[in-house]
Image: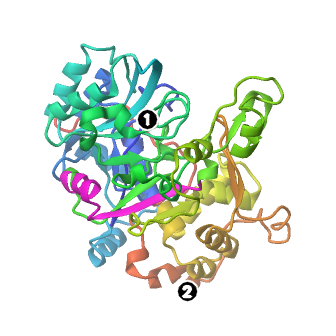
Amino acid sequence: MFFADLHIHSKFSRATGKDADLEHMALWARKKGVTVVGTGDFTHPQWMKELREKLVPAEPGLFRLRDDLERDVQRQLNESGFSDSAAIAQQAARPELLQGVSRFLLEVEISTIYKKGDFTRKVHHCVYVPDFDAADKLIARLSRIGNLASDGRPILGLDSRHLLEIVLESSPQSYLIPAHIWTPWFAVLGSKSGFDRVEDCYGDLTKHIFALETGLSSDPPMNWRLSQLDRFTLVSNSDAHSPPKIGREACAFACDLSYFAMKQALETRDGYAGTVEFFPEEGKYHLDGHRACGVRLTPPETKELGRLCPTCGKELTIGVMHRIDELADRPEEFTPADPQPASRNLVPLPEVIGEIKGMGESSKAVQAAYDQALAKVGSELFILDQAPPEELRRLGSPVLADAIERMRAGRVIRDAGYDGEYGVIRVFQPGELANRKAKSPLFTEVQNEQANAVSRMPRASIATSSLPDKKLRRPTFAGRKKAHQ
């Protein structure tokens, strides 16, 4: 099994980090335990130039970093304590665990804005192609419609149905997945500028849509309430605008490592193993509200107020829960007779550690504890989704073990997001950590034999992909020349 995050943005998209380059994407994918990441933004001419210069073919339809750049990434991991011999031994023991490699898949998010049915429609789409030839064909067509150099996520005055047609004509293996389908402003089913049915957006070509991205503010069980969505595979991705956000949501695959096997798994669900997700309340459009006035409302409260802000009288932003209520033909908690592959709700590890230590997730202390956790246990997704809590206790972190157990059981405190404001998920009650030395090192000092307990963990559980920097140092990749030049 391996994880894939297929919705990413590069440094050429708006509101992204300057380090959103291939090297940092590969580095953070290793730390997160994500095997395949989308390149993002392949229609942008400068980014495409970098993709051609830095990537080389790997498995069918996938790419990897050039050898010299891969060595740079490996060097950063080695300097942080990464052991090649241990990684090789662990990978040999369980070759199906493909977390020790970084692969790229050509991907771009495209925004279409157009008039249809007397309304202005704004819909985002994730587009995937199997090779650079297909990418070139797509770019040639789209460059006649809009300016692809203005943003890594291009904005085109183009009907979504026509975009899908152009994608399909670029290659028989190219495909399109509607992005974050419930986001109010830019989504196929969004409350502000979307449609009531997927078919209303893509028309006669809807049969070529086989998957939908649920977005951060919903999860698969929420989407099960709509029978119209039953035939679509539900996927989740990070929509990361900076490399450290990679893997906050991801898809799990149990198929061959290739573009074509992954596509087939999404089409048939054979080889598709589900998703890891935010708790949907953490998404920034889960509930209704008006952020400028600090007003957050549930759907019944919004209806009572006539959809107007009780403070200023302006129209409220209708959130994902409300929009699903409007379109649903099934009750809450409905489970289909043949449900899709499992989804697991997780809280990003820096947020968990930040709560334990009573500090912001970007603080140096939290980042140091995060690195320590990865060094002792494995990749972030392994820690959150697979690591046995008893092993965390044996390694000297009972408070983290308790947090992981509660999170996996869904025993969390949910402070829901609204109108562009992220929600907050907590695992401990206020004051509960006061007597647990929350501000001490995350892992207490343990005897050598106890510290080596990780070696006794099941071989499947040892993540070879994600060992941290012991010191808080920014990886440096700039200035490297091609090895063959």
Instruction: Please indicate, yes or no, whether residue 230 appears anywhere in the rendered image.
Output: yes
- First in sequence: mark 2 vs mark 1: 1
Camera sees residue 375:
no
| Quadrant, the N terminus | bottom left
Q: Is residue 144 above or below residue 289?
A: above
At mark 2, the secondary structure is helix
**Looking at the image, which residue is at 31% across and 57% down?**
101
Which residue is at the front of the view, 285 or 257? 285
Q: Amino acid at mark 2?
A: Glu
Q: Identify the residue at horizontal 61%, vertical 47% (top origin).
A: 321
Residue denoted by label 2: 449
Q: Position of residue 248 (x, y in %)?
A: 51, 51
Amino acid of disc 1: Val
**Which residues are drawn in magenta?**
260-279
Q: Quadrant of the C terminus?
A: top left
Give coordinates of residue 40: x percent, y percent: 36, 36
**Circle 1 crowding by C-alpha within 10 Å: few under 14, some 14–19, many from 20:** many
Q: Which residue is mark 1?
A: 188
